[in-house]
Image: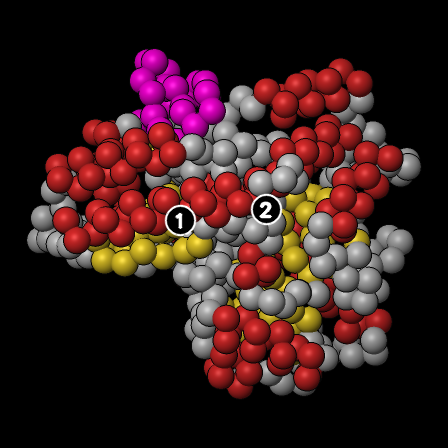
Amino acid sequence: MSITPLMPVYPRCEVRPVRGEGCYLIGERGERYLDFAAGIAVNALGHGHPQFTKAIAEQAATLMHVSNLYGSPQGEALAQRIVDNSFADTVFFTNSGVEAIECAIKTARRYHYVNGNPQRHKLITFKNAFHGRSIGAISATDQPKMRDGFEPLLPGFDYVKFNDLEGAIAKIDDETAGFLVETVQGEGGMTAGTVEFIQGLRKACDEHGLLLILDEIQCGYGRTGKMWAYEHYGITPDILTAAKGIGNGFPLGACLATEEAAKGMTFGTHGSTYGGNPLAMAAGQAVLDVMLEPGFFEHVEKMGERLRAGFEQLIPNHDHLFDEIRGKGLMLGIKLKEPAVSRDFVAHLRDNHGLLTVAAGENVFRVLPPLVIEESHIAECIEKLSAGARSYVPPADD
Ligand SMILES: *Cc1c(COP(=O)(O)O)cnc(C)c1O
């Protein structure tokens, strides 16, 4: 038998974290890393945040799980708080990002179904998109590395280039239900939607009776310096998916919708055993307790500007290696120049300089620190990055 007990679907690296302290991770051998990956944009409050830890410990001792067949004071309270702080009128809680995507796809199909247009089942999605790993979500992306070997996939998706408004509008037909798009693409290469593109999709939805679904699983929840990334664009969606930062590491996701968009989601149309259980709700409340404090998003914005300014100063000193800066707020990436390879550079920073970052598509490496970083962490990151850029030797291209 050679398969590992842990199904070997991840190429796991040598780092084996056993403890976290704020913006640092500590490995099995006691080695320390500056964690600018934050569980891929999950640990918004960093590791071991006292207020957060206390909230889930207390809730675990009080009531951890009950069935969704019972009334949920905890779920009602968190949903109300999210509604009060977003475009949405209603929220479905999930345990992951991809389940929020599934709920969004179902909500969009049901909307047209109850409107008497059941043929309107297709979503227009975008190249390089990442929406998760369920059959539904891999059907919503055109990336072969996620789809190969899993066909036949779910019908009902059309793919268009990201930021190509004309192409997206040209794809609309009688079967179109709406658009599913990341406001800022994460895995695909940290590309922010342009204002014309996101506003144009909104306008096309209004004109054609379609739904705009924003996937803000990575870019939402404060990551870009605003509660939601769509706030940068002066529009609101009909449906939005959130996860990652929403639970600071406790498995939690959410599908948000307007009353109109959710009108098909009646009794019995959807469900989840764990979704929105009291422990998850306590995690979600603790995150919002911190994030909705006055000045939190301003802090993220300011730290984002500082980090970006640090990158801007680095680039001219290493212009053989660094190409351009991408992203918004504390969701930043730098595109590398060939022959440098982002995955390889991420490994170099990790193994030789104790800095954790994440590779993304289009040869970009991502920097996704906890949102609670301070100037000292930024200075440390820039120092490590600068040393890493100096010592990096790209793989030989033979
Ligand atoms: C991470 C991510 C997902 C999937 O979330 P999971 O919790 O891994 O299911 C979906 N969309 C985007 C934009 C993501 O970044």
* Amino acid carrying mark 2 in the image: Tyr
Instruction: Locate residue 85, reporting x and y percent.
Output: 71, 50
Nearer to me, 322 or 362:
322
Indicate which disc residue 305 carries.
Answer: 1
Say which mark, if any, is on residue 159: none
Q: How dense is the environment of label 2, judged by Cα within 10 Å: few (below 14), some, or many (20 and up)?
A: many
Residue depicted at x 42% and y 46%: 304
Comparing 243 with 306, the one in front is 306
User: What range is drawn magenta here?
Assistant: 12-35
Tell me the distance, in whole angstroms, between the alpha carbons under discs 2 and 1: 18 Å
> Which percent across, then down, holds residue 18?
44, 18
| Residue 132 visible from this viewpoint | no
Q: Is residue 317 left or right of residue 181?
A: left
Q: Is residue 57 left or right of residue 316?
A: right
Could you tell me the amino acid type at mark 1? Glu
198 versus 132 height, above or below: below
Q: Residue at x 52, y 49 (%)?
A: 225
Residue that carries the numbered disc 2 in the rendered image? 221
- Residue 73 image-quadrant placement: top right
Query: Ligand 1 near label 1 (Cβ, under 8 Å)?
Result: no
